[in-house]
Image (tube, grey):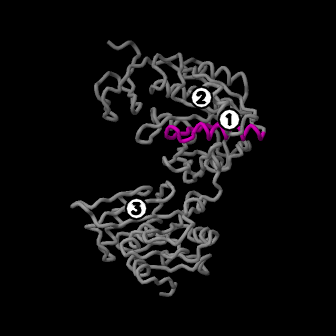
Amino acid sequence: MARDGAVYACQSCGAVQAKWAGQCPACQSWNTLVEEVGVRPPGAMSTTKATRNRGLQFTGLESDTPAPPRILTGVDEFDRVCGGGVVPGSAILIGGDPGVGKSTLLLQVCANASSRGVSCAYISGEEAVEQIRGRADRMGLAGAPVKLAAESSLRDILDGLKRDKFDLVVIDSIQTMWSDAHEAGPGTVTQVRACATELVRLAKKQGVAILLVGHVTKDGQIAGPRVVEHLVDAVLSFEGERGYPFRILRGAKNRFGATDEIGVFEMGDIGLREVKNPSALFLNEGGERAAGAAVFAGIEGSRPVLVEFQALVAPSAYGTPRRAVVGWDSGRLAMVLAVLESRCGLGFGDKDVYLNVAGGLRITEPAADLAAAAALASSALDVALPQDCVVFGEVSLSGEIRPVSRMESRLKEAAKLGFGRALGPLSGLPEGGGALPVAGAARLADAVRRIENDIWSSHA
Protein backbone atom coordinates (compact mmCIF):
# COMPACT_ATOMS: atom_id res chain seq x y z
CA MET A 1 0.00 0.00 0.00
CA ALA A 2 1.27 3.45 -0.89
CA ARG A 3 2.09 5.84 1.93
CA ASP A 4 0.10 9.00 2.54
CA GLY A 5 1.13 11.78 0.19
CA ALA A 6 3.07 9.41 -2.06
CA VAL A 7 3.07 9.75 -5.82
CA TYR A 8 4.84 7.83 -8.57
CA ALA A 9 7.32 9.58 -10.84
CA CYS A 10 8.56 8.17 -14.14
CA GLN A 11 12.35 7.92 -14.18
CA SER A 12 12.37 8.33 -17.97
CA CYS A 13 10.17 11.37 -18.67
CA GLY A 14 9.41 12.79 -15.20
CA ALA A 15 5.63 12.41 -15.45
CA VAL A 16 3.86 12.04 -12.07
CA GLN A 17 1.07 9.49 -11.56
CA ALA A 18 -1.27 9.01 -8.62
CA LYS A 19 -0.89 5.22 -8.59
CA TRP A 20 1.67 2.69 -9.70
CA ALA A 21 1.50 1.00 -13.10
CA GLY A 22 3.82 -1.24 -15.03
CA GLN A 23 3.93 1.15 -17.98
CA CYS A 24 4.20 4.94 -17.88
CA PRO A 25 1.10 6.41 -19.60
CA ALA A 26 3.10 9.45 -20.76
CA CYS A 27 6.17 7.94 -22.47
CA GLN A 28 5.11 4.26 -22.68
CA SER A 29 8.28 3.11 -20.86
CA TRP A 30 8.06 -0.05 -18.77
CA ASN A 31 8.96 -0.36 -15.07
CA THR A 32 10.01 3.28 -14.69
CA LEU A 33 7.42 4.48 -12.12
CA VAL A 34 9.07 4.90 -8.70
CA GLU A 35 7.32 5.94 -5.50
CA GLU A 36 8.25 9.26 -3.95
CA VAL A 37 6.81 11.06 -0.95
CA GLY A 38 5.72 14.61 -1.59
CA VAL A 39 7.82 17.07 0.45
CA ARG A 40 7.11 20.77 0.31
CA PRO A 41 10.36 22.51 -0.62
CA PRO A 42 11.54 25.58 1.27
CA GLY A 43 9.88 28.70 -0.05
CA ALA A 44 6.82 26.82 -1.33
CA MET A 45 3.38 28.46 -1.32
CA SER A 46 2.06 29.26 2.13
CA THR A 47 -1.58 29.74 3.12
CA THR A 48 -1.06 32.07 6.06
CA LYS A 49 -3.37 35.02 6.60
CA ALA A 50 -0.57 37.51 5.90
CA THR A 51 0.03 35.94 2.50
CA ARG A 52 -3.65 35.97 1.61
CA ASN A 53 -4.00 39.64 2.55
CA ARG A 54 -0.93 40.74 0.63
CA GLY A 55 -2.42 39.85 -2.75
CA LEU A 56 -0.76 40.07 -6.16
CA GLN A 57 1.22 43.19 -6.97
CA PHE A 58 1.34 44.35 -10.60
CA THR A 59 3.84 46.65 -12.27
CA GLY A 60 4.34 48.08 -15.74
CA LEU A 61 6.77 47.28 -18.53
CA GLU A 62 8.72 50.50 -17.94
CA SER A 63 11.73 50.26 -15.69
CA ASP A 64 14.41 52.74 -14.65
CA THR A 65 16.68 49.99 -13.29
CA PRO A 66 19.47 49.20 -15.77
CA ALA A 67 20.18 45.59 -16.58
CA PRO A 68 23.25 44.21 -14.78
CA PRO A 69 26.35 43.89 -16.97
CA ARG A 70 27.06 40.46 -18.36
CA ILE A 71 29.94 38.43 -17.01
CA LEU A 72 32.60 38.16 -19.72
CA THR A 73 34.41 34.91 -19.07
CA GLY A 74 37.28 35.55 -21.50
CA VAL A 75 36.33 32.48 -23.58
CA ASP A 76 34.87 34.35 -26.55
CA GLU A 77 33.23 31.33 -28.19
CA PHE A 78 31.42 30.49 -24.94
CA ASP A 79 30.34 34.10 -24.46
CA ARG A 80 29.06 34.22 -28.04
CA VAL A 81 26.74 31.24 -27.54
CA CYS A 82 25.50 32.68 -24.22
CA GLY A 83 24.46 35.85 -26.05
CA GLY A 84 27.42 38.10 -25.27
CA GLY A 85 28.38 36.85 -21.83
CA VAL A 86 26.81 35.14 -18.82
CA VAL A 87 23.90 37.03 -17.23
CA PRO A 88 24.19 37.37 -13.43
CA GLY A 89 21.47 35.38 -11.66
CA SER A 90 20.97 33.02 -14.60
CA ALA A 91 21.08 29.22 -14.64
CA ILE A 92 22.64 27.45 -17.63
CA LEU A 93 22.40 23.71 -18.29
CA ILE A 94 25.24 22.22 -20.39
CA GLY A 95 24.92 18.70 -21.78
CA GLY A 96 27.12 16.46 -23.90
CA ASP A 97 28.36 12.94 -24.45
CA PRO A 98 30.76 11.42 -21.91
CA GLY A 99 34.33 12.48 -22.63
CA VAL A 100 33.42 15.25 -25.05
CA GLY A 101 35.06 17.88 -22.82
CA LYS A 102 32.31 19.49 -20.70
CA SER A 103 34.41 19.59 -17.54
CA THR A 104 37.43 20.81 -19.48
CA LEU A 105 35.43 23.62 -21.06
CA LEU A 106 33.91 24.79 -17.79
CA LEU A 107 37.24 24.63 -15.97
CA GLN A 108 38.69 26.88 -18.67
CA VAL A 109 35.70 29.22 -18.36
CA CYS A 110 36.17 29.46 -14.58
CA ALA A 111 39.93 29.94 -14.85
CA ASN A 112 39.70 32.65 -17.51
CA ALA A 113 36.85 34.45 -15.74
CA SER A 114 38.60 34.38 -12.35
CA SER A 115 41.73 35.83 -13.97
CA ARG A 116 39.54 38.77 -15.07
CA GLY A 117 38.39 39.48 -11.51
CA VAL A 118 35.24 37.29 -11.45
CA SER A 119 34.74 35.31 -8.25
CA CYS A 120 34.34 31.69 -9.39
CA ALA A 121 33.70 28.35 -7.69
CA TYR A 122 33.92 24.87 -9.20
CA ILE A 123 31.97 22.20 -7.29
CA SER A 124 32.33 18.61 -8.48
CA GLY A 125 30.32 15.63 -7.36
CA GLU A 126 32.18 13.24 -9.65
CA GLU A 127 35.87 14.03 -9.11
CA ALA A 128 38.12 14.69 -6.16
CA VAL A 129 39.79 18.06 -5.73
CA GLU A 130 43.19 16.55 -6.59
CA GLN A 131 41.84 15.31 -9.93
CA ILE A 132 40.60 18.78 -10.81
CA ARG A 133 43.93 20.28 -9.78
CA GLY A 134 45.77 17.74 -11.94
CA ARG A 135 43.66 18.68 -14.98
CA ALA A 136 44.22 22.37 -14.33
CA ASP A 137 47.96 21.79 -14.08
CA ARG A 138 48.03 19.96 -17.43
CA MET A 139 46.09 22.82 -19.01
CA GLY A 140 48.37 25.48 -17.55
CA LEU A 141 45.61 26.94 -15.36
CA ALA A 142 47.01 26.06 -11.93
CA GLY A 143 47.58 29.73 -11.05
CA ALA A 144 43.95 30.79 -11.60
CA PRO A 145 42.16 31.89 -8.37
CA VAL A 146 39.30 29.38 -8.68
CA LYS A 147 37.75 27.96 -5.50
CA LEU A 148 37.39 24.16 -5.67
CA ALA A 149 35.15 21.77 -3.74
CA ALA A 150 34.19 18.11 -4.04
CA GLU A 151 30.69 17.72 -2.63
CA SER A 152 27.38 16.13 -3.63
CA SER A 153 25.16 17.06 -0.67
CA LEU A 154 22.79 19.81 -1.73
CA ARG A 155 22.40 21.12 1.82
CA ASP A 156 26.15 21.57 2.25
CA ILE A 157 26.47 23.21 -1.17
CA LEU A 158 23.68 25.70 -0.47
CA ASP A 159 25.13 26.56 2.94
CA GLY A 160 28.56 27.15 1.42
CA LEU A 161 27.22 29.33 -1.41
CA LYS A 162 25.19 31.40 1.06
CA ARG A 163 28.21 31.88 3.29
CA ASP A 164 30.72 32.75 0.55
CA LYS A 165 29.55 35.05 -2.23
CA PHE A 166 30.48 34.09 -5.80
CA ASP A 167 29.71 35.53 -9.21
CA LEU A 168 29.96 32.27 -11.17
CA VAL A 169 29.47 28.71 -9.88
CA VAL A 170 29.88 25.43 -11.78
CA ILE A 171 28.01 22.32 -10.57
CA ASP A 172 29.47 19.16 -12.12
CA SER A 173 27.09 17.43 -12.42
CA ILE A 174 23.42 17.85 -11.48
CA GLN A 175 22.88 14.05 -11.62
CA THR A 176 25.33 13.49 -8.75
CA MET A 177 23.65 15.96 -6.38
CA TRP A 178 21.29 14.65 -3.70
CA SER A 179 18.97 16.27 -1.18
CA ASP A 180 18.29 14.74 2.24
CA ALA A 181 14.69 15.99 2.01
CA HIS A 182 13.92 13.14 -0.41
CA GLU A 183 14.41 9.42 -0.04
CA ALA A 184 15.24 8.71 -3.68
CA GLY A 185 18.82 8.04 -4.70
CA PRO A 186 21.09 10.46 -6.61
CA GLY A 187 20.37 10.65 -10.32
CA THR A 188 16.68 9.83 -10.02
CA VAL A 189 14.02 12.15 -11.39
CA THR A 190 13.03 13.20 -7.88
CA GLN A 191 16.55 14.21 -6.85
CA VAL A 192 17.46 15.90 -10.14
CA ARG A 193 14.28 17.96 -10.12
CA ALA A 194 14.61 18.92 -6.45
CA CYS A 195 18.30 19.85 -6.66
CA ALA A 196 17.86 21.84 -9.86
CA THR A 197 14.93 23.74 -8.36
CA GLU A 198 16.90 24.75 -5.25
CA LEU A 199 19.99 25.77 -7.22
CA VAL A 200 17.94 27.88 -9.65
CA ARG A 201 16.16 29.51 -6.70
CA LEU A 202 19.54 30.34 -5.16
CA ALA A 203 20.75 31.84 -8.46
CA LYS A 204 17.73 34.13 -8.72
CA LYS A 205 17.82 35.15 -5.05
CA GLN A 206 21.54 35.92 -4.74
CA GLY A 207 22.30 36.97 -8.32
CA VAL A 208 24.95 34.29 -8.86
CA ALA A 209 25.28 32.66 -12.28
CA ILE A 210 25.14 28.86 -12.00
CA LEU A 211 26.36 26.50 -14.72
CA LEU A 212 24.92 22.99 -14.37
CA VAL A 213 26.50 20.02 -16.15
CA GLY A 214 23.95 17.46 -17.32
CA HIS A 215 24.50 13.90 -18.48
CA VAL A 216 22.91 12.77 -21.76
CA THR A 217 21.07 9.60 -22.67
CA LYS A 218 22.13 7.23 -25.44
CA ASP A 219 19.98 9.12 -27.97
CA GLY A 220 21.70 12.43 -27.15
CA GLN A 221 18.99 13.98 -24.95
CA ILE A 222 19.84 15.50 -21.57
CA ALA A 223 19.02 12.90 -18.93
CA GLY A 224 16.46 13.58 -16.24
CA PRO A 225 13.03 15.22 -16.32
CA ARG A 226 12.26 17.76 -19.00
CA VAL A 227 11.18 20.16 -16.26
CA VAL A 228 14.86 20.88 -15.58
CA GLU A 229 15.23 22.34 -19.08
CA HIS A 230 12.22 24.57 -18.39
CA LEU A 231 13.65 25.72 -15.06
CA VAL A 232 16.97 26.99 -16.41
CA ASP A 233 17.49 30.08 -18.55
CA ALA A 234 19.67 28.45 -21.20
CA VAL A 235 20.36 24.94 -22.44
CA LEU A 236 23.66 24.44 -24.26
CA SER A 237 24.79 21.29 -26.05
CA PHE A 238 28.48 20.43 -26.38
CA GLU A 239 28.88 18.18 -29.41
CA GLY A 240 31.79 16.36 -31.00
CA GLU A 241 32.24 13.38 -33.28
CA ARG A 242 34.68 10.71 -32.16
CA GLY A 243 37.81 10.85 -34.29
CA TYR A 244 37.51 14.59 -34.88
CA PRO A 245 39.25 17.17 -32.71
CA PHE A 246 36.50 19.75 -33.26
CA ARG A 247 33.86 20.49 -30.63
CA ILE A 248 30.71 22.51 -31.28
CA LEU A 249 28.90 24.40 -28.51
CA ARG A 250 25.32 24.97 -29.63
CA GLY A 251 22.40 26.67 -27.90
CA ALA A 252 19.05 24.85 -27.73
CA LYS A 253 17.39 27.43 -25.47
CA ASN A 254 18.49 30.89 -24.39
CA ARG A 255 16.35 33.50 -22.67
CA PHE A 256 19.08 36.11 -23.03
CA GLY A 257 20.27 35.56 -26.59
CA ALA A 258 19.86 33.76 -29.88
CA THR A 259 19.71 29.97 -30.13
CA ASP A 260 21.32 29.68 -33.55
CA GLU A 261 24.83 30.72 -32.50
CA ILE A 262 27.62 28.15 -32.34
CA GLY A 263 31.02 28.16 -30.68
CA VAL A 264 33.81 26.13 -32.27
CA PHE A 265 36.67 24.61 -30.28
CA GLU A 266 39.53 22.28 -31.07
CA MET A 267 40.56 19.69 -28.50
CA GLY A 268 44.30 19.49 -27.94
CA ASP A 269 46.80 18.14 -25.44
CA ILE A 270 46.42 21.13 -23.13
CA GLY A 271 42.66 21.58 -23.38
CA LEU A 272 40.27 23.31 -25.73
CA ARG A 273 41.45 25.96 -28.16
CA GLU A 274 39.04 28.52 -29.56
CA VAL A 275 38.64 28.47 -33.33
CA LYS A 276 38.21 32.02 -34.57
CA ASN A 277 37.83 31.04 -38.25
CA PRO A 278 35.94 27.71 -38.49
CA SER A 279 35.78 27.85 -42.30
CA ALA A 280 39.55 27.37 -42.62
CA LEU A 281 39.33 24.15 -40.54
CA PHE A 282 36.38 22.55 -42.32
CA LEU A 283 37.87 22.97 -45.80
CA ASN A 284 40.44 20.88 -47.62
CA GLU A 285 43.17 23.25 -48.71
CA GLY A 286 45.44 20.78 -50.45
CA GLY A 287 45.27 19.75 -54.11
CA GLU A 288 42.53 20.01 -56.70
CA ARG A 289 38.93 19.36 -55.72
CA ALA A 290 37.80 15.85 -56.66
CA ALA A 291 34.53 14.96 -58.31
CA GLY A 292 31.74 14.76 -55.75
CA ALA A 293 32.93 17.65 -53.56
CA ALA A 294 31.18 21.02 -53.23
CA VAL A 295 31.92 23.85 -50.79
CA PHE A 296 28.79 25.18 -49.09
CA ALA A 297 28.66 28.79 -47.93
CA GLY A 298 26.46 28.55 -44.85
CA ILE A 299 25.36 30.70 -41.94
CA GLU A 300 25.56 29.52 -38.31
CA GLY A 301 23.98 32.18 -36.12
CA SER A 302 25.64 35.46 -36.94
CA ARG A 303 28.78 34.01 -38.56
CA PRO A 304 29.23 32.62 -42.08
CA VAL A 305 30.85 29.18 -42.19
CA LEU A 306 32.22 27.38 -45.25
CA VAL A 307 32.10 23.59 -45.15
CA GLU A 308 32.67 20.87 -47.73
CA PHE A 309 29.93 18.47 -48.86
CA GLN A 310 31.32 15.14 -50.10
CA ALA A 311 29.23 12.76 -52.21
CA LEU A 312 29.88 9.36 -53.70
CA VAL A 313 27.56 7.73 -56.23
CA ALA A 314 28.59 4.13 -56.95
CA PRO A 315 26.94 1.12 -58.64
CA SER A 316 24.98 -0.98 -56.18
CA ALA A 317 26.30 -4.48 -55.62
CA TYR A 318 22.98 -5.70 -54.22
CA GLY A 319 19.36 -5.43 -55.21
CA THR A 320 18.55 -2.62 -52.80
CA PRO A 321 20.63 0.57 -53.26
CA ARG A 322 22.01 2.04 -50.07
CA ARG A 323 21.53 5.62 -48.88
CA ALA A 324 23.92 6.83 -46.15
CA VAL A 325 24.30 10.40 -44.91
CA VAL A 326 26.45 11.93 -42.15
CA GLY A 327 25.98 15.50 -40.95
CA TRP A 328 22.80 16.21 -42.91
CA ASP A 329 19.13 15.24 -42.77
CA SER A 330 18.42 11.91 -44.47
CA GLY A 331 14.92 13.06 -45.42
CA ARG A 332 16.40 16.10 -47.13
CA LEU A 333 18.79 13.83 -49.06
CA ALA A 334 15.87 11.71 -50.30
CA MET A 335 14.09 14.86 -51.50
CA VAL A 336 17.14 16.18 -53.38
CA LEU A 337 17.70 12.78 -55.03
CA ALA A 338 14.06 12.70 -56.16
CA VAL A 339 14.35 16.19 -57.68
CA LEU A 340 17.60 15.26 -59.45
CA GLU A 341 15.94 12.18 -60.93
CA SER A 342 12.62 13.70 -61.97
CA ARG A 343 13.72 17.23 -62.98
CA CYS A 344 17.32 16.74 -64.15
CA GLY A 345 17.34 13.27 -65.71
CA LEU A 346 20.00 11.81 -63.40
CA GLY A 347 19.35 8.22 -62.37
CA PHE A 348 20.11 6.98 -58.85
CA GLY A 349 17.73 3.99 -58.73
CA ASP A 350 20.51 1.41 -59.15
CA LYS A 351 23.25 3.40 -57.37
CA ASP A 352 24.49 3.56 -53.80
CA VAL A 353 24.57 7.14 -52.55
CA TYR A 354 26.82 8.37 -49.74
CA LEU A 355 26.83 11.98 -48.51
CA ASN A 356 29.13 13.39 -45.85
CA VAL A 357 29.68 16.82 -44.30
CA ALA A 358 33.42 17.12 -43.73
CA GLY A 359 34.80 17.97 -40.32
CA GLY A 360 31.99 16.48 -38.21
CA LEU A 361 29.76 19.55 -38.47
CA ARG A 362 26.00 19.02 -38.71
CA ILE A 363 24.15 21.24 -41.19
CA THR A 364 20.44 21.99 -40.79
CA GLU A 365 20.10 25.02 -43.05
CA PRO A 366 17.83 24.66 -46.15
CA ALA A 367 20.38 26.70 -48.11
CA ALA A 368 22.55 23.57 -48.23
CA ASP A 369 20.19 21.88 -50.72
CA LEU A 370 22.04 23.15 -53.79
CA ALA A 371 25.46 22.26 -52.35
CA ALA A 372 24.31 18.67 -51.70
CA ALA A 373 22.74 18.47 -55.17
CA ALA A 374 25.91 19.85 -56.78
CA ALA A 375 28.07 17.30 -54.97
CA LEU A 376 25.75 14.45 -56.01
CA ALA A 377 25.61 15.62 -59.63
CA SER A 378 29.38 16.08 -59.69
CA SER A 379 29.92 12.51 -58.51
CA ALA A 380 27.28 11.04 -60.83
CA LEU A 381 28.71 12.88 -63.86
CA ASP A 382 32.33 12.43 -62.72
CA VAL A 383 32.96 16.14 -63.25
CA ALA A 384 34.75 18.16 -60.56
CA LEU A 385 33.58 21.62 -59.57
CA PRO A 386 36.14 24.43 -59.85
CA GLN A 387 38.51 24.74 -56.91
CA ASP A 388 37.48 28.35 -56.26
CA CYS A 389 33.68 27.85 -56.35
CA VAL A 390 31.20 27.95 -53.46
CA VAL A 391 27.58 26.82 -53.67
CA PHE A 392 24.39 27.80 -51.83
CA GLY A 393 20.64 27.83 -52.48
CA GLU A 394 17.40 26.13 -51.50
CA VAL A 395 15.87 23.57 -53.88
CA SER A 396 12.10 23.20 -54.14
CA LEU A 397 10.23 20.07 -55.25
CA SER A 398 9.54 21.73 -58.61
CA GLY A 399 13.27 22.01 -59.22
CA GLU A 400 13.36 25.75 -58.65
CA ILE A 401 16.37 27.26 -56.84
CA ARG A 402 15.09 29.72 -54.26
CA PRO A 403 17.03 32.64 -52.76
CA VAL A 404 18.32 32.35 -49.20
CA SER A 405 19.05 34.86 -46.47
CA ARG A 406 22.27 36.86 -46.06
CA MET A 407 23.75 36.01 -49.44
CA GLU A 408 26.11 38.97 -49.29
CA SER A 409 27.65 37.72 -46.02
CA ARG A 410 28.19 34.28 -47.57
CA LEU A 411 29.94 35.79 -50.58
CA LYS A 412 32.15 38.03 -48.43
CA GLU A 413 33.31 35.09 -46.32
CA ALA A 414 34.09 33.08 -49.45
CA ALA A 415 36.04 35.97 -50.96
CA LYS A 416 38.00 36.39 -47.73
CA LEU A 417 39.15 32.76 -47.96
CA GLY A 418 40.27 33.09 -51.59
CA PHE A 419 37.26 31.79 -53.52
CA GLY A 420 36.61 33.48 -56.85
CA ARG A 421 33.11 32.45 -57.95
CA ALA A 422 29.79 31.11 -56.68
CA LEU A 423 26.89 29.00 -57.88
CA GLY A 424 23.59 30.13 -56.41
CA PRO A 425 20.03 31.26 -57.07
CA LEU A 426 19.36 33.62 -59.96
CA SER A 427 17.15 35.96 -57.93
CA GLY A 428 17.85 37.73 -54.66
CA LEU A 429 21.48 38.52 -55.40
CA PRO A 430 22.93 41.62 -53.71
CA GLU A 431 23.01 44.81 -55.74
CA GLY A 432 26.22 45.30 -57.68
CA GLY A 433 26.88 41.55 -57.84
CA GLY A 434 28.32 41.14 -54.34
CA ALA A 435 31.87 40.23 -53.37
CA LEU A 436 32.05 37.38 -55.93
CA PRO A 437 30.64 36.81 -59.43
CA VAL A 438 27.65 34.47 -59.11
CA ALA A 439 26.66 31.99 -61.78
CA GLY A 440 22.93 32.19 -61.09
CA ALA A 441 20.57 29.34 -61.92
CA ALA A 442 16.78 29.57 -61.84
CA ARG A 443 16.28 25.80 -61.80
CA LEU A 444 18.30 22.83 -60.62
CA ALA A 445 18.54 21.53 -64.19
CA ASP A 446 20.36 24.75 -65.16
CA ALA A 447 22.86 24.23 -62.32
CA VAL A 448 23.48 20.62 -63.39
CA ARG A 449 24.02 21.78 -66.98
CA ARG A 450 26.62 24.29 -65.77
CA ILE A 451 28.44 21.58 -63.84
CA GLU A 452 28.35 19.09 -66.72
CA ASN A 453 29.49 21.55 -69.40
CA ASP A 454 31.86 23.57 -67.17
CA ILE A 455 29.93 26.81 -67.76
CA TRP A 456 30.51 29.39 -65.04
CA SER A 457 29.76 32.68 -66.76
CA SER A 458 27.09 34.72 -64.99
CA HIS A 459 25.42 35.34 -68.38
CA ALA A 460 25.34 31.74 -69.53
Residue type at mark 1: give it.
Answer: Ala
Residue type at mark 3: give it.
Answer: Leu
Disc 1: CA contacts within 10 A as few (<14), some (14-19) or many (>=20)? many
Q: Range of the magenta residues?
A: 89-116
Element under disc 2: helix
Mark 3 or mark 2: which comes first in sequence? 2
Residue 406 included in the magenta stretch of the image: no
Residue 60 horizontal/vertical position (percent): 64, 43
Q: Residue at x 27, y 61 (%)?
A: 321
Q: Residue at x 51, y 68 (%)?
A: 295
Mark 1 or mark 3: which comes first in sequence? 1
Q: Which residue is mark 3?
A: 355
Q: Residue at x 49, y 23 (%)?
A: 186
Question: Is 417 left, or right, of 6 in this rendering?
Answer: right
Image: 32 above or below 444: above
Q: Quadrant of residue 25?
A: top left
The one of 440 and 276 positioned closer to us in this rendering:
276
Q: Residue furthest right?
A: 117
Residue 443 horizontal/vertical position (percent): 40, 77
Q: Which residue is mark 1?
A: 136
Label drawn at residue 199: 2
Question: Is 18 left, or right, of 37 in this rendering?
Answer: left
User: What is the CA distance from the residue labelled 1 to the residue labelled 3?
Assistant: 40 Å
Element under disc 1: helix
User: What is the CA distance from the residue labelled 3 to the residue labelled 2?
Assistant: 44 Å
